[in-house]
Amino acid sequence: MITTKDIHFSYGKGTSFQFPNIVASKGDSLLITGGSGKGKTTLLHILGGLLKPESGDVLIDETSLSSLSDRKLDHFRGKNIGLVLQQAYFVASLSVLENVVLASWLATGHQATEKAKQLLEQLDLKDHLHKLPSQLSIGQQQRVSIARALINEPKLLLADEPTSSLDDENAYKVADMLSGLAKQFGTALVIVTHDQRLKDRFPNQITLS
């Protein structure tokens, strides 16, 4: 579902990264770890098409991201890549349900309201559909982010430090949810993190050094 080939990226003449090749198939989960400054978030942004590598390529379901124009890349990302970022960036004035529905409308032009409700209920948020995101706990907000990332059934789900601000119980709960939902939706899951608690949850791992 996702394959990378010889990705190199640098910030000007300073920090430079040569990333290992990645392969993750439908329903697979991959954990990418490494210390601060090793390029974890940079790599995730490249995988999501938010940054362009200096050389190398990312292929998602055999589509080369480097072959797409900016407009086509935005459209492809909306339909095929789900992002769970460290900061959720909700629309503060919209309810939990409306934030998830908005993601479907932006990508497809359709409001998948019933599907959004089902996802949120599956993530144990049935009683919070009409609350504002600011009224939720951090753990609940993270689950809303997961629902929003999955609403369009992406081929690739990327999660950037999804458990770093959670206690042990909620960290393991979110990790298990991500893994289980990736299998359910047939989505390749890539998590980048420095959270050592997740190493026991994901046997497929790459450490950036």
Image: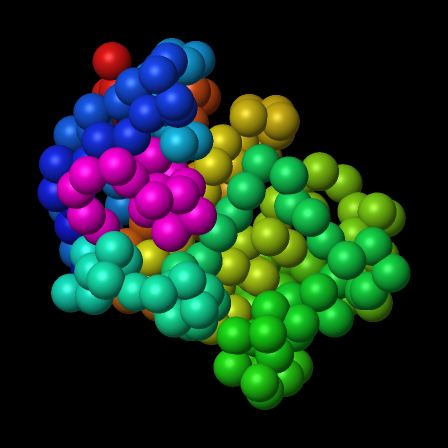
Give the position of the C terminus as an image quadrant. Answer: top left
- Compared with residue 12, is residue 141 higher up or lower down, i.e. above or below? below
Q: Quadrant of residue 54?
A: top left
Residue depicted at x 81% and y 64%: 95
- Name the outermost residue toward the bottom: 110
| Range of magenta residues | 43-58
**Viewer-proximal residue, 37 or 127?**
37
Residue depicted at x 34% and y 34%: 43
Residue depicted at x 38% and y 39%: 44
**Viewer-proximal residue, 100 or 57?**
57
Residue 197 at what x, y percent from top left? 42, 21
**Residue 73 visible in the snapshot:** yes
Residue depicted at x 30% and y 65%: 68
- In reply to whether residue 207 is colored magenta, the answer given is no
Q: Is residue 83 left or right of residue 166?
A: left
Residue 48 at what x, y percent from top left? 38, 50
Q: Is residue 202 left or right of residue 7?
A: right
Q: Quadrant of residue 113?
A: bottom right
Residue 116 at what x, y percent from top left? 61, 74
Task: Specify the color scheme.
Answer: rainbow
Q: Is residue 9 left or right of residue 99?
A: left
- Compared with residue 145, is residue 80 higher up or lower down, i.e. above or below? below
Give the position of the N terminus as an image quadrant. Answer: bottom left
- In reply to whether residue 45 is colored magenta, the answer given is yes
Q: Is residue 128 left or right of residue 184?
A: right
